[in-house]
Image (cartoon, helix red, strand yellow):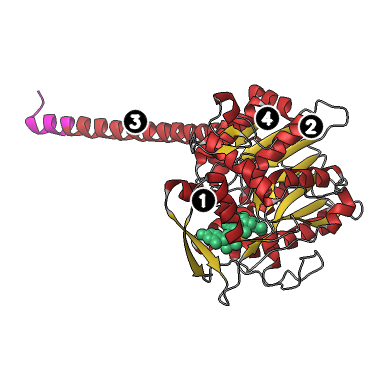
Amino acid sequence: MGSPADTSKTSKLERYNSYLLRRVSSAKVVAASSHLLFRATILAALLLIFLFLLHYPPLLSTSHYSAAAASHSNHRSLLSSASYGGAAWERGVRASASPRRPDGLSVLVTGAAGFVGTHCSLALKRRGDGVVGLDNFNAYYDPALKRSRQALLARHGVLVLDADINDGALLAKLFEVVPFSHVLHLAAQAGVRYATRNPQSYVASNVAGLVSLFEIVAKHADPQPAIVWASSSSVYGLNTDAPFSELHRTDRPASLYAATKKAGEAIAHTYNHIYGLSITGLRFFTVYGPWGRPDMAYFSFTKSILAGKPITLFRMPDGTAVQRDFTYIDDIVKGCLGALDTAEKSTGVAGGGKKRGPAQLRVYNLGNTSPVPVAKMVSILEDLLGKKAKKSVVTLPQNGDVPFTHANVSLAATDFGYQPTTDLATGLRKFVKWYLQYYSVETGKKINGKSNTAGEEEKGMAASA
Ligand SMILES: O=C(O)[C@H]1O[C@H](OP(=O)(O)OP(=O)(O)OC[C@H]2O[C@@H](n3ccc(=O)[nH]c3=O)[C@H](O)[C@@H]2O)[C@H](O)[C@@H](O)[C@@H]1O
């Protein structure tokens, strides 16, 4: 018989053994599960990398798309990357970009839902060129007007993508899908006086956006398209020699807007010099017309006069009138197409290599050559609308405005036959006709011998075409 002491020793030993066994097996379980966890983590990481590459195609072709360009694409590129690509998207882009005439151009138009962008895209499409537009549809002015322009372009077979020029990944993808012969770069933050309120938006669009486009064209596009882009008459700033010639000083900008456009001209020089990009800058002089920009004076004055609201007219501190060389949109379109048609090919090597030779670098004034006092513009509007403006005349504040603009266009006339043909009264009549139709305003006043009420079908037409 075993003693009670013996029994207790045995059971102690058994308890100890089972404790040891539990420890060994739990150690095994811990080791096994940490292996499992490690493998699962590796698998999950590989899966994530695979998914990222699948949805971010430019990284797959790193030979063309530099890491620098990728890092300059803002986070928007990652957010919007899922909204483009795929076979149907590529088919749509190619169809819109394909010319319908022999030797037709294939043009990427940035800011295509903007005022000048819409008119130029229509004109190009009408003569048989291929056009793909892009626009970020920002809210600087009523995005509904931009959507109407987009719809108008869609009816004419022009696709306008929702995209920002800072979206390097999207630009790279576009140049992969289409061998564009030209870029008409019109996307920008416009407006002279708004620059005091939102300076960063000018840097983002007119400097960073321009660099983003040049980077992709220089280092990714194959073939490299020629670029025609919108500079501004505002670069003449405090220049007092008139009429403004391309040879005059442009180193005294009066507004940040003007400074960013001048910076754009300097940046264009650099990309032409290093990468052989063919670049033409067009200095537009206060462009107006149907489908115009609501932030501009002729447009906002029309709205205020119709609503019986007061308008503010600026005059110089010495009492002299502020004048602008108002230029009608159809003349500007002819200038843009002339610049595109005479643009030479870029000479750079796709991928950003050394250029093969000097490339074309041009700057032209596109104006009307006859400055008009702003008060005269208002009196023409009063006549067309059959209503007097409530005017308050104030001394020009320190807002970036310049006293006058006046274009000498002889260079554009010589190089591509640019000749403005529309005077302010004629152009404003076309604008007012469009405005009253588009916003369904009935004034009872006859324009061109007809009542201003238009049929539905007429509202969507490019009134200037
Ligand atoms: O030619 C250009 O480079 C520029 O032309 C216009 O700029 P701006 O000439 O200032 O055009 P508006 O804003 O329509 O002003 C036209 C005139 O009306 C005057 N104005 C404007 C607003 C106002 O309330 N009162 C007033 O008298 C301005 O001083 C200016 O002389 C465009 O807005 C710019 O984007 C463009 O680059």
The answer, for residue 218, to whether it is visible in the render is no
| Residue topped by disc 3 | 25
Q: Amino acid at mark 2?
A: Asp
Label 4 CA crowd tier, 10 Å (few <14, some 14–19, many 20+): many
Mark whose residue sits in front, 4 or 3: 4
| Tag 2–tag 4 contact (CB < 8 Å) | no
Q: Which tag, 1 or 4, sits closer to the chain's start?
A: 4
Cα separation, mark 3 vs mark 1, equals 82 Å
- Residue 103: mark in rendering: none
* Residue 142 in picture, x, y percent from top left: 50, 43
The magenta span reads 1-11
| Residue topped by disc 4 | 158
Depth check: give the residue in front, 6 or 291: 291
Q: Amino acid at mark 1?
A: Ser
Cα separation, mark 1 vs mark 4, equals 29 Å
| Residue topped by disc 1 | 300
- Residue 129: mark in rendering: 2
Label 3 CA crowd tier, 10 Å (few <14, some 14–19, many 20+): few
* Residue 397 in picture, x, y percent from top left: 51, 70
Within 8 Å: ligand 1 and the Cβ of disc 1? yes
Q: Is residue 160 above or below residue 243?
A: above
Determine whether the residue tagged by mark 4 lies in a helix, strand or loop: loop
Q: Which tag, 2 or 4, sits closer to the chain's start?
A: 2
Name the residue furthest right: 357
Determine whether the residue tagged by mark 1 lies in a helix, strand or loop: helix
Q: Is residue 324 above or below residue 14?
A: below
Q: Tell me if 27 is positioned left or right of 130 in this view.
A: left
Count of marks placed on residues:
4
Q: Which tag, 2 or 1, sits closer to the chain's start?
A: 2
Q: Please state, as top left, top right, bottom left or bottom right, where the C terminus lies in the image.
A: top right
* Residue 54 falls inside the magenta stretch: no
The answer, for residue 339, to whether it is visible in the render is yes
